[in-house]
Amino acid sequence: MDDTDHKPDFTPAPRRLRHDGWTPERQRAFIEALAATGCVAEAARAVGVSENSAYRLRRDPRADGFRLAWTLALDCGLQRLADRATSRAMHGVPRPIFHNGEQVGEWRHFDERLTMFLLRARDPSRFGHWVGREETERDQDLAVRLLPLALRGLGEVGDLADDEDDFPMDQE
């Protein structure tokens, strides 16, 4: 598989050809950097253009493909941010312990507000505010039952879930 298989698939905005301008390659590299960082300023720096130039290209009426790719790239960046926040909520953040000016250990800080925010956003029927909340029916074990099937689809469960009877699904 060559590098072209990993390039973002969009139609770059037509631009006047300049060696230091927004070539199709530079537009693709910017979108890749934006997806990786989630930050327009960092992505622009990574490809050697100004942040203002990137926003100017985004406003160009001929840049529909670039705008759409930009939006999708930011979604990728936001997913990375959500993954990092979830990791911090689950595993905590190390905080150093000092004694007489030297680090002698560390402890893990768990941010309960972050944890509650993530729980409420992910499953408001279970973790949302109680006042004015409508009760909704929810299959509490659905995720537990679907996960082995999803993993089997990815080819990661192998022999552990070869028998579908181990994970019965309600048929409607």
Image: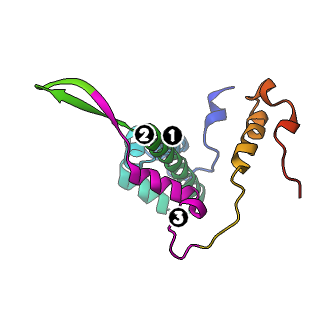
User: Residue 102 location in percent, x, y?
Assistant: 16, 23
Q: Are marks 2 and 1 in contact (CB under 8 Å)?
A: yes
Q: Are marks 3 and 2 in contact (CB under 8 Å)?
A: no
CA separation in Å, label 3 and label 2: 42 Å
- Mark 2 residue element: helix
Q: Residues within 10 Å of mark 1 (few under 14, many from 20)?
A: some
Q: Earlier in the sequence, mark 3 or mark 2?
A: 2
The residues colored magenta run 106-133
The residue at the point 40 percent across, 38 percent down is 92
Give residue 47's mark.
Answer: 2
How many numbered discs?
A: 3
Percent across and percent down for residue 162 are: 85, 29
- Residue matched to label 1: 29
Q: Residues within 10 Å of mark 2 (few under 14, many from 20)?
A: some
Res 84 label:
none
> Which residue of the protein is positioned furthest toward the bottom in this rendering?
132
Q: Type of residue at label 1?
A: Ala
* In magenta segment, residue 118: yes
29 to 133, vertically: above or below: above
- Residue 161 is inside the magenta segment: no
Camera-side residue of 38 and 137 = 137
Q: Earlier in the sequence, mark 2 or mark 1?
A: 1
**Label 3's element?**
loop
Q: Quadrant of the C terminus?
A: bottom right
Mark 1 and mark 3: Cα distance apart in space: 40 Å
Q: Is residue 134 left or right of residue 26?
A: right
**The disc label shown at residue 128, or none:** 3
Amino acid type at circle 3 is: Gly
Earlier in the chain: of badge 1 and badge 3, it is 1
Q: In screen coordinates, is 134 left or right of 100?
A: right
